[in-house]
Image: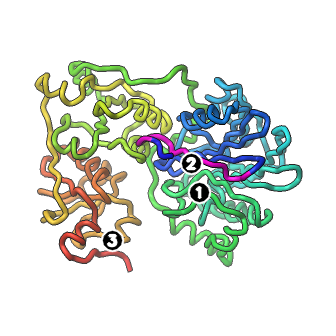
């Protein structure tokens, strides 16, 4: 089934029929998979759980399971781990690398250490590369390998990025990733591969890649495993790396310390118009999560549009500093839980509340409103600003478009076209985010393309430019 926007997507069914049963819980927005293993005695192991545990708890409840073990393959940079929460509220034993020097109680594992799961065994395999302390977890039934939770080491069709610890460590970690992938490739071909990072992850999974595989399939089809030498592997992996969200730079350390344990269900306190104004005067940012069409008609001056959809958490964490207070504007049909939990999962904890009554209340109290017009593909004229990722732009763009990635706009506003400009992305949501970000910097001459480059090409009959 598909969850509501902002929720992880729960993929029904077990990956391994019979015992053990392994369930994937896919967060389509972050591009990650959490794995829940039924241990056969009413208990469960969860691998790489996020701070947003709604999907984990829902599945465990439906299956009549208690989470007994929570394993983290590495110090995640793209989401806060839910392992500490499961340890505090469910009594789960936390399994993680001893080399991670985590600041909370956990079972400290090194290479080759086994954990008795009660009929099954989980074996730690040191697989550095994505991070220094990265472990893969081999699931054994007796002595027979069933599958391996590879986290950010071997992923379907690739390997996770190796540049998160800085330029001075990237080459070293990429060479370590080479050795780790080849160590995993020595497992039997039938061994299932259960990575955490997948398609849509900024930790670098190929677009459209499957969420799981086998060792044999990866040996046959993963181009990194086919690289003829370590140097070729390094060149190939590093050439595929694009930009990544700003919050990646501090979230791993937050996971090392351990996220704060949450009590109860966090909510969004109701704020009056006057309270919102005072918060804005004190430096708070208003995040408008309504659909872009609603934002276009009118939004609070200085607010930042980040539409509530699967990618909401990524852009919230990328564009809002962690020490900034956040005020939410939403529509009545948008569930506050789908805003709060993704925010907490990427470390945006300073949620001051929401504007009670939304934009209607703001307008009723005489609040000013900014409009940002939408234009249709055939109406695009003049200057165009394309804010998609580099790989998207290279795949096809308007010939006259100026390109600045959305994540770089705060540092590269001077590189954007002057005068009336149409901002565009793939569909319009990110373009509206960019437009409101530039409006915060003083721009008042922007419109947003409702659509993307393919829509423009179809509407005008013109040809897109792109890399050969």
Q: Between 401 and 38, which is closer to the camera in this rendering?
A: 38
User: Residue at the location (57% across, 71% down)?
Assistant: 236
Is label 3 in a helix, a strand or a loop? loop
Name, please, the residue furthest toward the bottom.
468
**In front of the other: 464 or 378:** 378
For residue 351, above or below residue 98: above
Q: Which residue is at the far right?
A: 143
SS type, badge 1: loop
Quadrant of the snapshot with the C terminus: bottom left
The label shown at residue 396 is 3
- Which sits earlier in the primary sequence, circle 3 or circle 2? 2
Q: Is residue 329 visible?
A: no
Q: Is residue 351 left or right of residue 118?
A: left
User: Which of the two labelled residues, at mark 3 and mark 1, occupies the earlier sequence position?
Assistant: 1
Asked if marks 2 and 1 touch (Cβ < 8 Å), the reply is yes
Gap in angstroms between the C-alphas marked 3 and 2: 32 Å
Q: Residue at x 18, y 36 (%)?
A: 301
Position of residue 8 in the picture relative to residue 258 (left or right): left
Give the foreground label among 2 and 1: 2
Residue 179: x, y in percent?
A: 72, 64
**Is residue 102 in view from this perspective?**
yes
Disc 2 secondary structure class? loop
Q: Which residues are magenta?
A: 4-17
Q: What scheme was used to colour the molecule? A: rainbow
Which of the labelled discs sits on residue 53, or is there none? none
Residue at figure coordinates x 34%, y 57% from the top left: 405
Residue 211's tag is 1
Q: Is residue 387 magenta?
A: no
Distance between the alpha carbons at the discs numbered 3 and 1: 27 Å
Q: Which residue is mark 2?
A: 11
């Amino acid at each position: 089934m598909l969850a509501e926007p902002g929720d992880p997507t729960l993929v029904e069914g077990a990956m391994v029929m019979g015992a053990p049963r392994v369930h994937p819980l896919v967060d389509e927005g972050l591009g990650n998979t959490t794995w829940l293993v039924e241990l056969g005695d009413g208990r469960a192991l969860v691998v790489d759980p996020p701070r947003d545990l709604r999907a984990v708890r829902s599945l465990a409840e439906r299956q009549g399971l208690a989470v007994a073990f929570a394993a983290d393959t590495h110090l995640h940079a793209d989401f806060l781990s839910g392992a500490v929460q499961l340890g505090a509220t469910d009594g789960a034993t936390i399994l993680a690398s001893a080399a991670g020097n985590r600041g909370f109680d956990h079972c400290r594992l090194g290479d080759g250490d086994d954990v008795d799961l009660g009929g099954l065994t989980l074996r730690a395999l040191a697989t550095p590369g994505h991070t220094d302390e990265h472990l893969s977890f081999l699931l054994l039934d007796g002595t027979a390998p069933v599958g391996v939770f590879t986290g950010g080491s071997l992923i379907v069709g690739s390997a996770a990025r190796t540049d998160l610890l800085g330029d001075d460590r990237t080459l070293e970690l990429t060479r370590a990733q080479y050795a780790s992938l080849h160590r995993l490739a020595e497992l039997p071909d039938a061994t299932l591969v259960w990575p955490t990072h997948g398609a849509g992850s900024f930790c670098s999974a190929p677009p459209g890649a499957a969420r799981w595989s086998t060792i044999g399939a990866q040996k046959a089809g993963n181009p990194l495993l086919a690289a003829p030498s370590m140097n070729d592997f390094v060149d190939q992996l590093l050439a595929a790396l694009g930009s990544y969200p700003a919050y990646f730079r501090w979230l791993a350390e937050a996971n090392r310390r351990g996220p704060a344990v949450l009590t109860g269900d966090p909510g969004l306190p109701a704020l009056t118009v006057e309270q919102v104004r005072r918060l804005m005067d004190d430096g708070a940012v208003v995040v408008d999560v309504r659909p872009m069409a609603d934002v276009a008609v009118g939004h609070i001056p200085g607010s930042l549009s980040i539409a509530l959809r699967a990618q909401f958490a990524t852009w919230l964490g990328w564009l809002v500093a962690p020490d900034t207070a956040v005020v939410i504007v939403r529509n009545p049909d948008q569930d506050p839980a789908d805003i709060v939990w993704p925010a907490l999962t990427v470390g945006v904890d300073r949620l001051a509340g929401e504007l009670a009554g939304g934009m209607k209340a703001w307008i009723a109290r005489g609040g000013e409103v900014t409009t940002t017009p939408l234009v249709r593909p055939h109406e695009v004229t003049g200057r165009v600003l394309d804010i998609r990722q580099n790989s998207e732009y290279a795949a096809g763009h308007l010939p006259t478009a100026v390109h600045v990635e959305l994540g770089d706009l705060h540092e590269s506003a001077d590189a954007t076209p002057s005068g009336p400009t149409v901002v565009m992305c793939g569909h319009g949501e990110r373009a509206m985010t960019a437009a409101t970000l530039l409006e915060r910097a003083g721009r008042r001459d922007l419109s947003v393309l409702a659509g993307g480059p393919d829509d423009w090409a179809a509407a005008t009959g013109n040809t897109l430019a792109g890399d050969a």
